Image: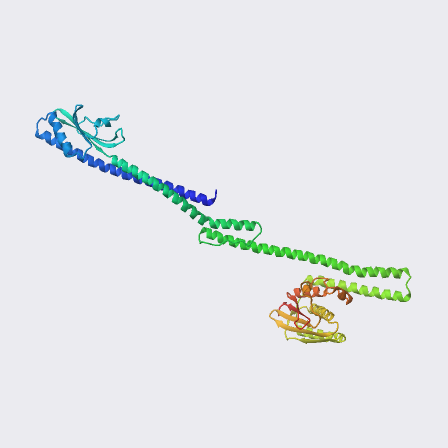
Amino acid sequence: MKFHLKMALSMLALLSLLFGIGGSMLISASFKESLEQEGAAAFGNYRMAWGTLQIVNGLETYLDRAALSQTMKQLYQQNSTFWTSLRLSANGKVIYEGGDIQTTELQTDESVETSVPGDCLLHVLEDLEGNHYLVLSGAIETNGDILCLTTSRCISGLYAARDHQLNTYFRVFLVMCLLCGLLSYTVSRVLTSPLKDLSQATRMIASGHYAGCVRIRSQDEIGALSQDFNTMAEQLKADAEQRERYIEQLRQSVERQERFIGSFAHEMKTPMTSLIGYADLIRSGTLTQEEQAEAADYLCSEGKRLESLSRKLLELLVIRQHGIPLIPASPKELVEQFVRQLEPVYQEKGIRLSYDCKEGVCLIEPDLVWSLLLNLADNAQKSMENGGDLRFQQEMTEDGCLIRVLDSGRGIPLQALEHLTEAFYRVDKARSRKQGGFGLGLALCQEIAVFHNGSLKFANRAKGGACVTVELKGGRS
């Protein structure tokens, strides 16, 4: 059964119980009070009749039964509104009986008359037609006789009024139960609607949708529960996003490792195949002296190529160990010295070098920064086959320095921007291999920047060429 139905039925049962008990007690108390009032009035009228009988008996020393009957008849006729019936008897014989009903018709298993002088009995009796009467009976001794006076008063109106009240109450009770049921159901639905929202949001979270939150409608316990649920949902969402990011990072790391291994195997396969082939030719002794010299030159160049590859990989491994200390140095002096040393070589290629540097000292590893500048300059000159401008800009920051390398080359394809720092990645594989590159230079630059708690960013210039921004955050002291 739904919780809101339980609430509605509980409220209906509680109201029915309380309203039923309260209404019944109220009607019963009202009927009892009315009955007591009727009894008091009947007793007063009874005392009046006894008083009249005693007065008459006191005036006459002896009254025969005919005189007593006449006296009681006059008394009844004068006060017929007080009694339904009036009966006077002596020694079991009726002296006078008048009224709409005979007292004998009200006889039950218990006698309504008393023969003990001074006693007064009060009964509520019912006739054969279902009418109710209030019967009073008393006895007095006079002239040796014991007279018994019995009066009755119809109180069927009280019972009819009670029955009418009960019928009215029953109809009102049914209407109240119906209204209470409707109101209880409506109120319970309104009160439990946040729980329904919580249930739906819980199912959404269980199915993997962590965006489900509930609207807080009140500041009570359910509102506090909704707030706690939203907090939990936000935390689960954050944890899920963090897990997804971590899984995505693992996936990308695995992909990079797979590409690294594949690229490394490819880089090793080509020169090794050439080395083995030329070595077999030389060993066969079928080459001329000129061909042998050419094969030896090729073996030497491929050997140097493998040596360069191993050196690059070793530098990557050393940097990742983070075992090199940072020392205070001037980035301006380092850049100026690098440009002066590189300028003659680049001038032969038609590349004009320039720099703009600011004074300052920060914590860096000079040899690694030199290697970073060398790799960035080498990549820049490869993109300027017909010459161009290569400019170095350096400025100080709060926690290190900023170096920009700007060239006027062909720029970087948009699809290659996010892969430039991957090992063995080449924008133009044919041209890079012809120029002697392995695709490790920018990967090495990335590791050097990370070693200095910095970053490496690539962008294309609006006027053509590329801009590489290196931020080094090793500190200022």
Indicate left or right for 336 with 52 as reference: right
Above or below, 221 against 367 in this view is above
**Is residue 477 in view from this perspective?**
no
Front residue (pair 154, 274):
154
Q: Position of residue 156 (x, y in %)?
A: 25, 34
Q: How many marks?
A: 0
Q: Quadrant of residue 421?
A: bottom right
> Left or right: 237 with respect to 1?
right
- Residue 250 location (% of width, % of height): 66, 56
In percent of width and height, residue 379 lies at 72, 68
- The reply, left or right, for residue 172 in relation to residue 416 is left
* Residue at point 70%, 57% (across, down): 257
Task: Say which of 237 and 455 sits in front.
Answer: 237
222 shown above or below 441? above
Please determine whether, in this image, residue 144 is positioned above or below residue 161: above
Q: Residue at x 50, y 50 (%)?
A: 198
Q: How is the image coloured?
A: rainbow
Q: Quadrant of the C terminus?
A: bottom right
Specify whether residue 270 is in view.
Answer: yes
Give the quarter of the image for residue 447: bottom right
Q: Is 463 left or right of 212, judged from the image as shown?
A: right
Residue 222 point in image, percent of width and height: 46, 51
Q: Which residue appears at 64% of the width and 55% of the height?
A: 247
